[in-house]
Image: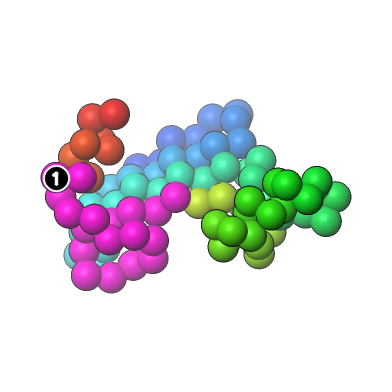
Amino acid sequence: MVRFELEDNTPIRVAYGHDEFTGFFISVYDARLKWDPDNDEALNGLLESLYIGDGGGSYFDAHTGPGGFGKKIDVKVMARLKDS
């Protein structure tokens, strides 16, 4: 597995790389988007609609391989994400 993680002093973390199971992958986590009973109803409603109601924060995950979590995409789409 080859995994790189960009992490600084912001609430956003980005990981990307390649392995046999997930193929190429990219994952983005934003700690500001955690479900919390103290959030206003609009924010928690958004998080619930994105299936992020577990309190863990917001994730975007994409992969090109046969397994893994998140959305499976093709290599051309992954290349476009990489170049953005």
Residue 72 within the magenta-colored segment of the rendering: yes
Disc 1: which residue: 76
Query: Measured from the top left, where is residue 70 in percent x and y?
Result: 39, 61
> Which residue is found at the position 28% from the left and 70% from the top?
67
Neighbours of disc 1 within 10 Å: few (<14), some (14-19), many (20+)? few
> Which residue is found at the position 27% from the left and 38% from the top?
81
Judge left or right: residue 1 versus residue 69.
left
Is residue 56 visible in the rendered structure shown here? Answer: no
Q: Quadrant of the C terminus?
A: top left
Res 82 → quadrant: top left
Res 49 → quadrant: bottom right
Circle 1: residue type: Lys
> Which residue is found at the position 28% from the left and 56% from the top?
63
Question: In the figure, 80 relative to 44: above or below?
Answer: above
Judge left or right: residue 32 versus residue 37.
left
Span colored in magenta = 60-77
Residue farthest to the left, as pictured: 76
